[in-house]
Amino acid sequence: LKADKGINFPETNMNINGLTEKDRKDLAFIVKNADAVNLSFVNQPSDVKELQKELEKHGASIGIVLKIETRKGFINLPKILLQAMQTYPLGIMVARGDLAIETGWENFATIQEEIMRLGEAAHVPVIWATQVLESLAKKGVPTRSEITDAALAQRAECVMLNKGQYIVKALKTLNEILVKMQSQQKKRQTMLPKLKNNESLSLIYAGPEKLSKKN
């Protein structure tokens, strides 16, 4: 077990409260300096209610981001949302690192989709997080699967990048990908635009003669 690493017990029902004593102390600083607070490992509506009560004690009206990263949190998400929607602003983070381990790799793709659908149905913005363009941010070169993953993030309202030596390059690349995807995808709806890339690539491979005729 290395530093900053955790252990998952996906099939264990651990009765742990949503907030620790350190969390309660940290809130005093958060409400004065932040616009929103992430609620990590939220498992049930009572976790959200506990945070809401603490925010009320501070007289704060900052937003809450629900980090869905456990099996229990995913199963209870509809009920969690009903409780959390008493707070505005509100967001959902698909915390894909722990969530994939908790729910199983073979299930994760559909679970990710269901979270997106629940967010859309509830009109709650969704944050697409964990390992987005991670190789690019850390090593300067993305993998092919990272590019398609970043493109799929167009369906969310927000995308979160992790830190890295090449984070500025990753940010610019992500922006370019998402801008181009706007004509292809809107939330879960495929836009079916004209095939522009197909035509431009055909002209390139056709040679200069056909290109000059086209112009």
Image (cartoon, rainbow, N blue to C red):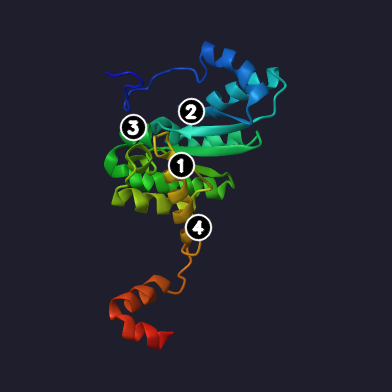
Image position, residue 86 (x, y; %): 65, 34
What whole-number distance in Å separates the C-alpha atoms at marks 4 and 3? 32 Å
Q: Residue type at mark 2? A: Val
Residue 102: which disc? 3
Distance, label 4 to label 1, CA atoms, is 17 Å
Quick one: label 2, few (<14), some, or many (20+) residues within 10 Å? many
Q: What residue does disc 2 label?
A: 42
Q: CA distance from mark 4 to mark 2?
A: 32 Å
Residue toward you, 173 or 21? 173
- Of residues 187 and 199, the one nearer the viewer is 199
Mark 3 to mark 2 CA distance (whole Å): 13 Å
* Residue placed furthest toward the right: 59
- The amino acid type, in three-letter code, at marker 3 is Glu
Q: Which mark is first along the chain, 2 or 1?
A: 2
Q: Is residue 54 above or below residue 43?
A: above
Q: CA distance from mark 1 to mark 2?
A: 31 Å
The vertical placement of 123 against 104, above or below, is below
For the residues labelled 1 and 2, say whether their Cβ atoms are less than 8 Å apart: no
Mark carried by residue 179: 4
Q: Quadrant of residue 162?
A: top left
Q: In the visual, does 126 lie left or right of 54?
A: left
Q: Earlier in the sequence, mark 3 or mark 2?
A: 2
What's the residue type where badge 4 is placed? Val
Residue for badge 1: 168
- Between residue 156 and residue 49, name the one nearer to us: 156
Residue 215 spot, x, y in % from top left? 44, 84
Name the residue rendered at 52%, 27% in the picture.
Answer: 39
